[in-house]
Amino acid sequence: IAAHFGPKRLSGKTAIVTAGPTHEAIDPVRFLGNRSSGKQGFAIAAALAEQGASVTLVAGPVALATPEGVRRIDVTSARDMAVAVAAALPADIAVMVAAVADWHVEAAGQKLKKSAAGPPVLTLIENPDILALTGHAPNRPRLVIGFAAETGDLLANAKVKLAKKGADWMIANNVSEGVFGTDANHVYFVTAAGTEDWGAGSKADIAERLATRIANAL
Ligand code: CTP
Ligand code: CA
């Protein structure tokens, strides 16, 4: 609530937020995707805009309303998302919340049909890593923040991703706890300096806390 009445601590700052899943076409009717709802990314875009930042939200296919005052760019695939993020640079802040598909396939122009030859074999091709490209870009934002969705060793994996992707901070969450599509989350805030357990909170709470942290850092 304080954020609604307090000073706009991010006025004059620009931010790029990615959110939602990406869909990778297999043919004109089918795709590879994942369970991301986009709620956490949309909440972060809203919280940054609430603090006065000029926010570009690059959204994969989700069924969510655009937060007030946010410029939204809708994309479908990871490759589209990478292009939209590059076009939105430079910015002061980048928060990569999207559950970007790690692979795409060479999409068929026609609907694939069952045949006596057996099921089609999909060859997966790795997608661009949008967070890593942003973290290592010559016009890198001052603050580059990623999310790490893990089912295994959460914090160790998040630290590896932090370093590898050139991020300043990672928000790590355990996706084996059934986070996708829900309003709640339990996250850890991971930096080169160490790790903080932010405990359980709503996606809106986490977004406000992150926005405050960003304002403190800039
Ligand atoms: N990310 C991205 N582009 C990709 C893959 C991931 O920008 N092609 C970003 C996500 O938005 C997130 C962070 O990287 O901020 C971590 O995503 P995650 O899926 O946890 O990491 P990966 O590097 O894809 O590793 P893996 O899925 O193998 O654990
Ligand atoms: Ca991944």
Image (cartoon, grey):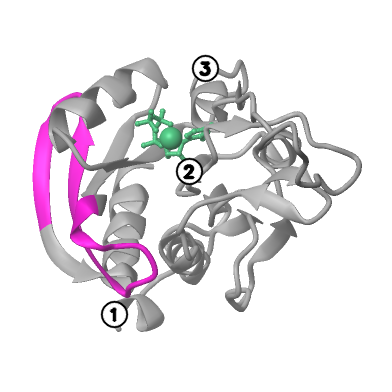
Judge whether residue 103 can be spotted in this image.
yes
Q: Label 2: which residue?
A: 96
The three-letter amino acid code for the residue at tag 1 is: Ala
In the displayed structure image, the side of residue 86 where residue 99 appears, left or right:
left
Image depth: mark 3 or mark 1 in front: 3
Q: Secondary structure at mark 2?
A: strand
**First along the sequence among labels 2 and 3:** 2
Dot 1: within a 10 Å radius of its alpha carbon, few (fewer than 14), some, or many (20 or more) residues?
Answer: few
Mark seen at residue 2: 1
The three-letter amino acid code for the residue at tag 3 is: His
Image depth: mark 2 or mark 1 in front: 2
Q: Say whether mark 2 is within 8 Å of ligand 1.
A: yes
Where residue 144 sits: x, y (%)? 44, 34
Dot 2: within a 10 Å radius of its alpha carbon, few (fewer than 14), some, or many (20 or more) residues?
Answer: many
Start and end of the magenta stretch? Answer: 176-198
Compute the Cα span from label 3 to label 1.
35 Å
In the displayed structure image, the side of residue 175 where residue 43 appears, left or right:
right
At 30% from the left and 37% from the top, the residue drawn is 170
Q: Label 3: which residue?
A: 136
The three-letter amino acid code for the residue at tag 2 is: Met
Compute the Cα span from label 2 to label 3.
14 Å
* Magenta-colored stretch includes residue 45: no
